[in-house]
Image (cartoon, coloured by chain):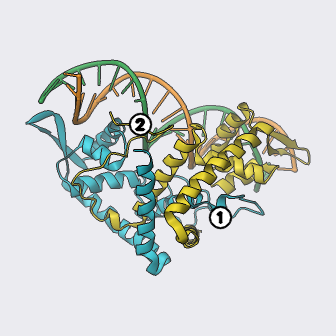
Chain colours: A yellow, B cyan, C green, D orange
Amino acid sequence: MSKSSRKLHLPEGSPAREAPANISYGSLPNKIGFHLRMCQEASFRAFAARAGEPDMKPQRYTILTLIGENPGITQTVLSRCSGRDKSTLTPTLNDLRARGLLERRRIESDRRSFQLYLTPEGETLLARLDHHSDAHDRDLDTIVGANKTALIRLLRRITTSLAQQDV
Amino acid sequence: MSKSSRKLHLPEGSPAREAPANISYGSLPNKIGFHLRMCQEASFRAFAARAGEPDMKPQRYTILTLIGENPGITQTVLSRCSGRDKSTLTPTLNDLRARGLLERRRIESDRRSFQLYLTPEGETLLARLDHHSDAHDRDLDTIVGANKTALIRLLRRITTSLAQQDV
DNA sequence: TATTGTTATACTCTATAACTATA
DNA sequence: TATAGTTATAGAGTATAACAATA
């Protein structure tokens, strides 16, 4: 097996590597959406391999970042910012709390809500993830070169345009 | 609720829309990887909303396309082309067969393998999905404009560069 | 009544490992 | 021994709906 020789950790989606064959991909290679998906998967795997934190997927990294950047953010706001339903967040936040990465405090002025804060351990982990993320993005920068700004601008434009379509 | 007014079908990930607040996203907005994820999610949702086939996610569309383009492709080859483990494919292919969208034939010269073919119903569905996919990609083309070729080239470069890192 | 967060439930996707049947 | 495909098992992620506590 020539499988995972130089790969560090590949928590999910390890295969995909091996070259196909004389296979036709039809119209897919002309579709932006297809390449977005391929590219996002490749980026995710590369980040996961680098970070070596099998339980810290991009979505969790985003959650930690949002809490770190906005201490005291509530779960509902967090759910909107991260684009997931609030019920989706509950198990994740419980898990992160169980790992001692974050804590929450009840808001006395509105006892329905909780404010979220990173613990020192959470800060440490976030810093480590940031480090890997920076390195990963430097890789991407190298690949993309001078086109980075334009690329991000394009991706943002697509994201916002598509989101506005169905408001 | 201003939720899904003009949305057709949003099988998964329906929220995400509502604007955040005075929230800081830290370094995320500078990260290509972050925007890839946001963009891919937005593209996926827009496609799903347009196609209105809640069970036909991009991955399944890719599978149908690959079989349609390469009649007689075997499951193992298909799994490599679609970037998923062969065991992952089994339930999906069973489901697609149960829906009458594809069929398989044993290869007599190697009775371990099966060749996959679309049924007429599968061809019809694929044509319909192609139609939606084309429309969706025309939307993307409009958003991206003259940059399409450059964008795809960049995305491909990222995908292949990252994939080669860990061979 | 409306909102915050939880629970209950369900489904999809994905993986690895062990298995079978064939080669 | 090696390969094609299945089964068993597991886990993450996501959704909707109903609920309790609070506003």
Q: Which mark is residue B120?
A: none
Q: Which mark is residue B2?
A: 1
Q: Quadrant of the C terminus of chain B?
A: top left
- Quarter-wise, where is residue A81 in the image? bottom right
* Residue B60 percent coordinates (x, y): 35, 51
Q: Residue furthest bottom?
A: B146
- Mark 2: few/some/many CA within 10 Å (<14, 14-19, 20+): some
Name the residue nearer the viewer: A88 or B148: B148
At horizontal 36% and vertical 70% (from top left) the residue drawn is B134
* Residue A101 percent coordinates (x, y): 74, 37
Secondary structure of the residue carrying tag 2 is: loop
Q: Is residue C4 above or below residue D7?
A: below
Q: Is residue D20 above or below residue B21?
A: above
- Alpha-carbon distance for marks 1 and 2? 48 Å
As shown in the figure, which amino acid type bears the numbered disc 1?
Answer: Ser
Secondary structure of the residue carrying tag 1 is: loop
- Quarter-wise, where is residue A18 in the image? top left
On screen, residue B70 versus residue C11, left or right, reads left
Can residue B70 be seen in the rendering of this structure? yes
As shown in the figure, which amino acid type bears the numbered disc 2?
Answer: Ser
Q: Quadrant of the N terminus of chain B?
A: bottom right
At horizontal 68% and vertical 56% (from top left) the residue drawn is A80
Name the residue nearer the viewer: A30 or D7: A30
State the residue position of label 2.
A4
* Residue B52 percent coordinates (x, y): 42, 60
Q: Which callout, 1 or 2, points to the residue nearer the camera?
A: 2
* Chain of the residue on which disc 1 is drawn: B
